[in-house]
Image (cartoon, grey):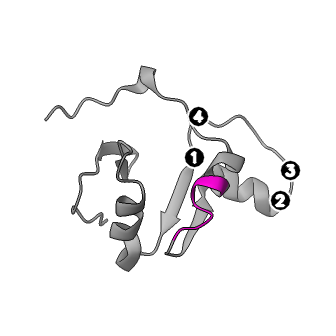
Amino acid sequence: MSTDIPYGSWEPLTLAAVLQLLADAPYTWGIAGGYAIEQFLATPIRDHADMDIMVFRDEQLHLHSHLADWLLYAADPPGTLRPWTAGALWHS
């Protein structure tokens, strides 16, 4: 399996699209990163190239299962991405 990330072939979801996608999610989730800060401040700060979603560690496989048809990546500090394959737990 290639670990190359197809940066040129994707577009980030809007906040509204994420809310719709995860509206019936059977796990706890939230918006993180820049969008979360903007929601807290109630004002936009800048354009965003991505959407950060957080889930509790013990529910992460529920998210993966919920988005089984998606190509998912995990963000590892300090800012690298890796493919997030089915059954693989994310940890820092």
Q: Residues within 10 Å of mark 3 (few under 14, many from 20)?
A: few
Q: Is residue 48 magenta?
A: no
Most distant residue in the right direction: 42
Name the one closer to the observer, 31 or 92.
31
Which mark is on residue 6?
Answer: none
Quarter occupied by the C terminus = bottom left
Estimate the spatial distance between the alpha carbons at disc 4 and disc 2, rounded to whole Å: 19 Å
The prevailing secondary structure element of the residues shown in magenta is: loop
Most distant residue in the bottom direction: 58
Most distant residue in the left direction: 1
Dot in front, 1 or 2: 1
Q: Amino acid type of disc 1?
A: Met
Question: Residue at position x 68%, y 58% from top?
Answer: 36
Drawn side of residue 28 relative to residue 73, left or right:
right
Q: Earlier in the sequence, mark 1 or mark 2?
A: 2
Report if the CB atoms under discs 2 and 3 are less than 8 Å apart: yes
What residue did someone put label 1 on? 51
Report if the CB atoms under discs 3 and 4 are less than 8 Å apart: no
What residue did someone put label 4 on? 49
Drawn side of residue 28 relative to residue 37, left or right:
left
Q: Earlier in the sequence, mark 3 or mark 4?
A: 3
47 is higher (above) or lower (below) than 79: above
Estimate the spatial distance between the alpha carbons at disc 3 and disc 4, rounded to whole Å: 17 Å
Q: Amino acid type of disc 4?
A: Ala
Drawn side of residue 61 relative to residue 67, left or right:
left
Q: Secondary structure at mark 3?
A: loop
Q: Amino acid type of disc 3?
A: Thr
What residue did someone put label 2 on? 41
Dot in front, 4 or 2: 4
- Give how far across and how far down residue 28 sits, in percent: 53, 75
What residue did someone put label 3 on? 43
